[in-house]
Amino acid sequence: MKKANTIHIMTETLHCEAIELNLVGLDGNAYSLMGAFQRAARKQGRTAAEIKAVLDDCMSGDYDHLLQTLVKHTC
């Protein structure tokens, strides 16, 4: 029995470079931090899907998870 080939097509390619954003000195409010990330990411040419993926990850846990996620995606 011959196995059918499956073709997987990605509709978007996500950037893996970090967003240039210094989190030190920013208001520590979660929404303020995510807003700063979103503004910086837009200015640096990231797509809405890329930004949403990071923000969704930020909101998937507690405040500590949010901070770890933003640190992972910024430089």
Image: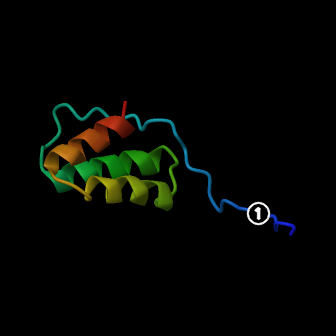
Along the viewing direction, whichever of 67 and 62 lies nearer the viewer: 62
- Position above or below: 9 against 46: below
Asked whether, in this view, residue 63 is left or right of residue 48, the answer is left
* Label 1 crowd (10 A; few <14 / some 14-19 / many >=20): few
Residue that mark 1 sits on? 7
The quadrant of the image that shows the N terminus is: bottom right
The residue located at (28%, 32%) in the rendering is 22
Asked whether, in this view, residue 65 is left or right of residue 69, the answer is left
Along the viewing direction, whichever of 65 and 12 lies nearer the viewer: 65
Asked whether, in this view, residue 53 is left or right of residue 58, the answer is right
Q: In this view, which residue lies farthest toward the front?
A: 1
Where does the image place residue 47, in percent across and percent down from the top left?
A: 52, 56
Q: In this view, which residue lies farthest toward the right?
A: 2
Q: Secondary structure at mark 1?
A: loop
Along the viewing direction, whichever of 13 and 39 lies nearer the viewer: 13
Q: Amino acid at mark 1?
A: Ile
